[in-house]
Image (spheres, rainbow, N blue to C red):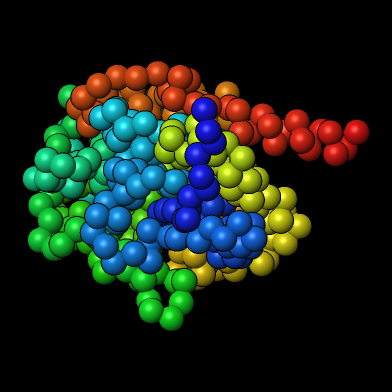
Amino acid sequence: MTQASKPDALWYTRCSIPTPLGLGAQLGWYKEEFAADGITIKSLQESTDPVEQASHFEHSLPHSFRLGGSVPAIWTKAKGRETRVIGISWIDEYQAIIALPESGIRTPADLRGRKLGLPARSQRKDSVDVARATSLRGLLLGLELAGLEHKDAEWIDVASHRDAERDIQAPDTQVRRRRAHSYTDTALALARGEVDAIYVKDVRGAETAHLLGARVVADLGFHPDPHFHINNSTPRPLTVDEQTLREHPDLVQRFLARVRDVDGWARQNPAEAVRQIALETNWTESWVRFAYGEKTHQSLAVDLSERSIVGLSEYKDFLLKWNFIEKDFSVRDWIDAGPLLALSQASQSKAA
């Protein structure tokens, strides 16, 4: 069998959250790595083609890598898309259940019988409802802290009166601008008294809590038990289309190596790492530190640790139970440890 010719381009996509893949892009490492091969490195965030943009959720483009929230990655795998997980990133972040002080809600136990706000179900049949899945998971975890269940609260669908959030690329910079805030609708419902508590996350969630003067009823993102961290953004799978892994394992290994290199670089350059995260996410450095902690520069590894695999499996089970995906699959079978193992072996050989 003849070896497949090298692709003309490699695609990557990431979400507007800190990821080692995103920092590697900010630093120009992928273009540097593949320049001599004549391979163009392309970001989906820079594309204006709707078909190409759809690959952020569908992972439909050949020769493409994705590191971001796990809901789309799990959803597209459950639909039968041939992708493989070659690494997992675990970055703890601000996650909270918030309520207004006048609600009288101070602890998770106070959520019993109260109105919990969820983004209304998306009417799109060709996509997965990331916002609803994320909020439902967070609110259920908040109830779990008090030994409560879904039936113990009243669930209110909060309708959206705006276009779905989309990231757009400024023409002269890598910094992305958002057209809408993630929590506009649920925050307004909370402020109007239509709901009693909502789930928020990352910098946008922290901004929302501060703007409303809200009380943090449950701190999920930094809870001592990592079980309560598990949601769309923790952990995050790094996936590649299976054809590329099968036909060009060397290219996959080289791309993964540069993603993995971010961890060591960030540990040696903590201030610059935070600055790059701020550029990548369009957040200030102070908000990055607040939402991800003072040691966020030590959280940019990609691995296949048991904690990450178990966490990803638990979240897949949640999506299946609550009908965000229709078909079950094994997360362990989804993983291909070959590229990461090859990198580890190469590192050990150099050290010997």
Asked which quadrant contains residue 163, the reply is bottom left
- Name the residue nearer the viewer: 68 or 194: 68
Residue 271, how many percent across, how many down? 68, 66
Asked which quadrant contains residue 32, the reply is bottom right
Residue 145, how many percent across, how many down? 38, 29
The answer to whether 331 appears left or right of 323 in the picture is: right
The answer to whether residue 290 of the structure is visible from this angle is no
User: In the rendered view, would you say 65 is above or below 235?
Assistant: below
The answer to whether residue 122 of the structure is visible from this angle is yes
Residue 240, how many percent across, how many down? 46, 39
Residue for point 38% across, 66% down: 46
The answer to whether 130 appears left or right of 340 in the picture is: left
User: In the rendered view, would you say 77 is above or below 173?
Assistant: above
- Name the residue nearer the viewer: 70 or 294: 70
Q: How many marks?
A: 0
Residue for point 40% across, 33% down: 83
Residue for point 44% across, 53% down: 11
- Name the residue nearer the viewer: 19 or 77: 77
Residue for point 17% across, 24% down: 151
What is the residue that sits farthest to the front in this orientation?
A: 2
Residue 220, how many percent across, how many down? 43, 40
User: In the rendered view, would you say 119 is above or below 315?
Assistant: below
Quadrant occupied by the C terminus: top right
What is the residue that sits farthest to the right in this orientation?
A: 352
